[in-house]
Amino acid sequence: MLNDTITHAERELYLTLLELAQQQPSAYEWLTRLPTWLNDIKDKANYAHAPAYQASVARLPTLTVNNVDLNSDVLTIEANLSESQRKQTMALLKQLMPWRKGPFQIGGQLENQIDSGQNEDQQAAPIFIDTEWHSDWKWQRVAPHLGNLKGRRVLDVGGGSGYHGWRMAGAGADTVIIIDPSCLFYHQFMAIRHFVGAADSYKTHYIPVPLEALPEHSQLFDTVFSMGVLYHRQSPFEHLQQLKGQLVKGGELVLETLVIEGDANTVLVPHDRYAR
Ligand SMILES: C[S@@+](CC[C@H](N)C(=O)[O-])C[C@H]1O[C@@H](n2cnc3c(N)ncnc32)[C@H](O)[C@@H]1O
């Protein structure tokens, strides 16, 4: 049987924006554009792999989730997981490789394991998604410098698989919207959303668009994160302007990027890509 995780997440996103628009009229523009944004990511003509990624998420099994910890370095979803569910989940998550930003863990605690899993219904070892990058290390570096996220509306620009966005929700943010144009990362987020379920009270959302696609002067967010994105942009100045346009007056911008030696007048504007 197929799950309705993506449809459900989309509905929650609509409801969140609708509620927001009642207090902040600039959010109406987001609501108007949302159907296009969400349709585009499903369009095979734009993203050849979209149908396959969608099918992988839709086939993830429904587990009994006992606890979700969005506040730990390994983002952990404790759930009952049989051997057959483990095999099925592993195979589907592999369809969503490469997993670059994490780590995540799904399943029970190893010490609760009954035996080596001969019996199909016994608790299997948890699934550990050991990602290419230790996103928890970046969060440890950044977190001490942040204003309190409790109750804040947050935008994470270029949020990848959503690891940091989940951590922002774990740190008490009221609403988190992650944006990133990657079709793969969007579906990785949806895979994790599938297992997190309602544990975050649906305060963590994902819109699969680049920053440039957003209405320019929304001024909707108390905190805007841009981590590891600025040096990808051909026009860093424009990126900064666009970030500013998403912030409320007096809001906080968290900019994490590569730095170069120099004084206040030294600016690196890459003519081409920063790497390769
Ligand atoms: C190096 S990764 C950083 C991911 C994550 N923020 C982190 O710090 O680990 C850069 C991310 O920016 C995304 N990205 C690239 N261009 C973007 C744009 N114009 N708007 C938003 N995100 C963008 C990429 O898809 C990628 O996920």
Image: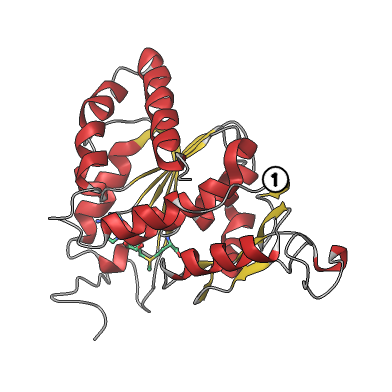
Q: Residue at x 53, y 47 (%)?
A: 194
Q: In front here: 260 or 160?
A: 160
Q: Is mark 1 within 8 Å of ligand 1?
A: no
Could you tell me if residue 159 is visible in this image? no
View extreme (bottom): residue:
276
Question: Which residue is painted at 46% across and 53% down in the image?
Answer: 59
Q: Is residue 76 left or right of residue 56?
A: right
Tell me where residue 163 appears, x and y as whole percent.
Answer: 52, 57
Quadrant in the rendering for residue 10: top left
| Above or below, comparing residue 203 to residue 188 in the picture | above
Report how many numbered discs are placed on residues in the image. 1
Please tell me whether residue 255 is drawn above or below residue 193 in the rendered image.
below
Q: Nearer the viewer, residue 243 or 102?
A: 102
Residue at x 28%, y 23% (from the top left corner):
26
Q: Quadrant of ligand 1?
A: bottom left
Please state the horizontal and vertical placement of residue 121, each as a whole percent of the image: 75, 59
Q: Residues within 10 Å of mark 1 (few under 14, many from 20)?
A: few
Identify the image quadrant of the C terminus.
bottom left
Q: Position of residue 91 (x, y in %)?
A: 50, 69
Reading the image, the residue beneath label 1 is 64
Say left or right for 165 vs 239.
Answer: right
79 or 129, which is in the foreground?
79
- Residue at x 41%, y 68% (from the top left corner): 95
Query: Which residue, as the protein is rendered here, is positioned at the far front?
Result: 119
Amino acid type for the residue under numbered disc 1: Thr
For the question of whether residue 43 can be seen, the reply is yes
* Image x and y of residue 238, in percent: 19, 52
